[in-house]
Amino acid sequence: MLSSSVMIRRFCTFTLTASSSPSTSNKKRLVFLGSPQVSASVLDALFNASAAPDSLFQEAFLFNFKSLEPELCVTAAYGNILPTKFLNIPSKGTVNIHPSLLPLYRGAAPVQRALQGGVKETGVSLAYTVRKLDAGPVIARERVTIDDQIKAPDLLELLFNLGSKLLIRELPSIFDGSASGSAEKQDDSKATLAPKITPEESWLSFEEDAHVLHNKVRAFAGWPGTRARLKVIDPSTGESSIIELKIITTRVYGGIRSQDIEANEVLYTKGSLVIPCGVGTALEVLEIQLPGKRAVNAAAFWNGLRGQMLKKL
C-alpha cells in the first residue's frame, strides 16, 4: 500500500509490469490527478483496487496523455481547470470527487464554506467533469451528518475517504457506460458557491454572533487559521498593550449571558476564556497560540498573564 505521506502534486504513476503492458493487458487505463495531501487517500484506494486480481483498470502516467489512450481520468482536489481538449481524450470521460453535496458548494473551498455556514449535513459527490465549474452530472453521492466541533482538516479527510470508496464502487458502471446514462443533471438554480479562502478573512470580530465565530474557527482550521486581537491591562499600573492571538479551538458558551459580563471583559472559567460577543452570545476559547509560540490550552495561557486582565477591543 502506498503511504499517504507520499506527496502528490499533480500527476501520479503506477509502474506497469511486462506481463501487464498496455499492448497486452485487457485492463482499462485510468489516469489520476490530485493536488494536496488529502487526495492521497483516493490514490491509495485506486492502487489497492488496481492490484486486485479482478480489477478492471490500471494506473497510467500522464507523460504523453493522448498517446496513452486513457479510458478514464479521475480528479480529486485538483486545482486547475481542465481544457476541453483534455476532457475530450478519455473515452469514458473525467470524473471528479468533490467534497460537497452538489450542486451545493461548487468551487475551491467546499468543506470550509460548508462549516462556515454551520451545516449539520454534508457529503461527497462523484460527478462528471465539464467546463463549467463543478457543474457536471452527478453519478453518486454519499451523505454524512456532522457535529458542531469537527474542523475542516478532519472533515476533508473523512469526505475523501468516503469519496474513495464511492469511486471504487461506481467504477464498473463508469467503465461500462451505464453511469453516463443514469447520472443526475444538476439543478443550477440550487447551486451555491464556495470561493477560495483568503488570509484577510481570518480575523475575528467579537461583535458578531458567537455561533458565526465558532463556525469560522472550525472552517479555517489548518489554513489560514483565525486570528484576534485582545487588550492586556496591568491592574497595578493601568498600562495596556495589544496582543494578537491565533484562536485554535472554541465552542459557543452556554453559561451566563454576555451582557452579564462587565463591559468587554474576558473571563476565565472552568479551563476556558469566555469572550462576550454580539447579540447576547459569548465564545468559549479552549486553545490559543501566540505568534512564534506553540499552541496552549486556555489555562496555560491565563496563568502566563500573571494577574493581568484581558478585554476585547
Image: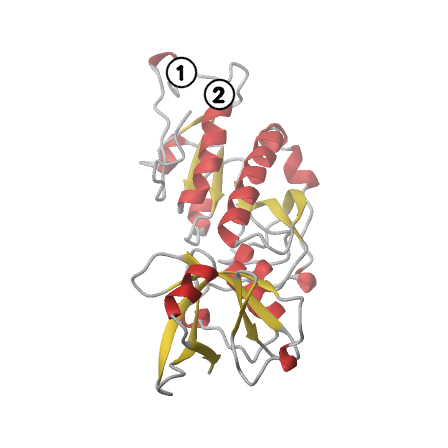
| Residue shown at the point (63%, 53%) measured from the top left | 102
| Residue shown at the point (34%, 23%) measured from the top left | 15
Q: Nearer the viewer, residue 154 or 123?
A: 154
Specify the amino acid type for callout 1: Ser
Left or right: 278 in relation to 245: right
Give the image location of residue 235, x and y in percent.
41, 83
| Residue 20 disc label | 1
Specify the amino acid type for callout 2: Lys
Asked if residue 310 can be seen in this view, the reply is: yes
Asked if residue 132 can be seen in this view, the reply is: no
| Residue 27 disc label | 2
Q: Residue 106 falls in which quadrant of the image?
A: bottom right
Which residue reaches farthest top? Answer: 19
Asked whether disc 2 touches disc 1, contact meaning CB atoms under 8 Å apart, the reply is: yes
Q: Nearer the viewer, residue 84 or 209?
A: 209
Q: Residues within 10 Å of mark 2 (few under 14, many from 20)?
A: some
